[in-house]
Amino acid sequence: MPWKPPTPIEIYQLLPKTNCGKCGEANCMAFAIRLASLDAKLEDCPPLIEEEKYKGSYEKLQSLLLPPVREVVIKSPKKVVKIGGKYVLFRHEMRYHNPTAIAVDVDDNMDRDTIIKRVKMIEGFEYEYVGQKLKLDAIAIRSVSNDPKKFAQTVALVAENSSLPLVLCSTNPAVIEAALNVLNPPHHRPLIYAATKDNWREMAEVAKRFDVPLAIASPGDLNLLVSLAKTLSEDMGLKDLALDPGCIVGPGGFAYTIKAFSWLRFKATYDLWKHAGFPLIGTPISVWTQMSGDPKDVMLWEAVLATILITRYADLLIMHSLDGWVLLPQVMWRFQLYTDPRKPVAVPAGLREIGKPNEMSPVIVTTNYALTYSLVSSDAEKAKLNAWLLVIDTEGLAVDVSVAGRKFTGDKVAEIIKSAELEKKVKHRILIIPGKAARVSGDIEDATKWRVMVGPMDSSELGKWLEKNWTSEKIKELMGGS
């Protein structure tokens, strides 16, 4: 039987039932409903965490809400990445949690300048997509030399020049130990990769001593992979594990890879098999050792394999290519896959800058529906506008729908004006709203005390509309001739 979330009633029975409101909800039942849908955390209830008399209830709730795929944390002093923590096999059952982390590699045979340049490229990778900044998550450091001292120096160099969490890649326990001595956990908590049938005991001892998560690699042999997971978790007492079933490209390789990842996630979420219930690691980087020929062909297969693995449940990818045409599809597809299918895709509400706006630049109002925001901002940029873009929270609804559903209201516009401190940024008190929101112009004026201009029906007409209507004469007229 697949994992099923506890009902709100089951959760409510274990809550304090004081209706104190400290969780931000009106009562404990409302909080129970949010917990059941995984939209809240147990830590949001202070009495449950702080009062000793609720300790037993807290532990029972933890068990009820525990995901069948364990959540594993890797971190640097400045950033935390969570992998795993999955509840369901299919996205329509409940949204996926903890988007697939993407790590790109460096190795200890690279010279200092190459390492720093590559680290800066990984760290600086960023692509803005529907109001979100899509980035890479970690750096994988590979020991090619098999020299503990050289690897430790490389790890120290990367740590000095990056804020990202690390994956330490070597099957030599002495090499991994040397690197961990440099990183000095718990400030850094890297993932160590990997334990195999030949070194599992030594790698387990290192992982236990430094309290870091450990990856298990058994390419092409799922029975051995699960057996090692059972031994390391039950006999060695390790809880933070990750599984790498291998990425094989040759004849039949793709079929095996897809089946292996699918089988492990099915066994974890449907059969609740605890020895498969760990994050899955995909290594598209392995195509570079399995293929030869034109590097662009190898890069293409790396991109193809990475996309497949994100879709087929990989919780962490280790990649080599840094070209935008390889990485952009991964971060964009990951963003789409990990949105909540129960809710429209939305961008954060707030104030944005288009071009270089000043105190007399127009203020354009739009909704936080991702597609609407994307169209308005891109049309404004194409028109080379210098403007303020005020994005209001319409719960991810487009303009016409949000107006009809009373999500595009004067109160919400007033709230954003206040939180963004817009009155300190512009001298005028004029808002430009979409043509489809014309009927709420009066409501907005009443709530904000700003004058409202009804703009064009389509944002593609913004440039021409502003050229005609945003004139000094019109501004003076709306501001009462001042």
Image (cartoon, helix red, strand yellow):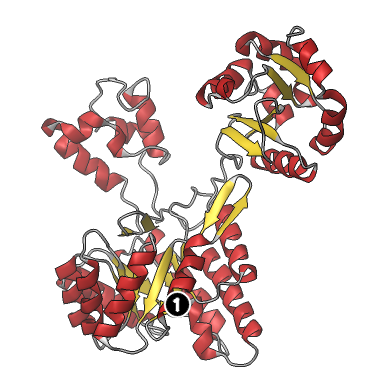
Q: Residue at position x 21%, y 69% from top?
A: 233
> Within the image, what quadrant is residue 7 found in?
top left
The answer to whether one can see residue 389 in this image is yes
The N terminus: image quadrant: bottom left
Residue 477 higher or lower than 314, as above or below: above
Q: Residue at position x 61%, y 36% from top?
A: 352
- Residue 243 image position (x, y, % from top left): 36, 72
Q: Amino acid at mark 1?
A: Asp
The C terminus: image quadrant: top right
Residue 419 higher or lower than 82, as above or below: above
Q: Nearer the viewer, residue 209 or 475?
A: 475
- Residue 384 image position (x, y, % from top left): 77, 42
Q: Residue at position x 73%, y 11% from top?
A: 479
User: Is 231 situated left or right of 480 in this image?
Assistant: left
> Within the image, what quadrant is residue 438 found in?
top right
Q: Which element is circle 1 on?
A: helix
Q: Nearer the viewer, residue 199 or 38?
A: 199
- Residue 403 image position (x, y, % from top left): 70, 23
User: Is 244 situated left or right of 461 in this image?
Assistant: left
- Residue 83 image position (x, y, % from top left): 38, 59
Q: Nearer the viewer, residue 79 or 409?
A: 79
Residue at the disc numbered 1: 113
User: Is 138 situated left or right of 454 in this image?
Assistant: left
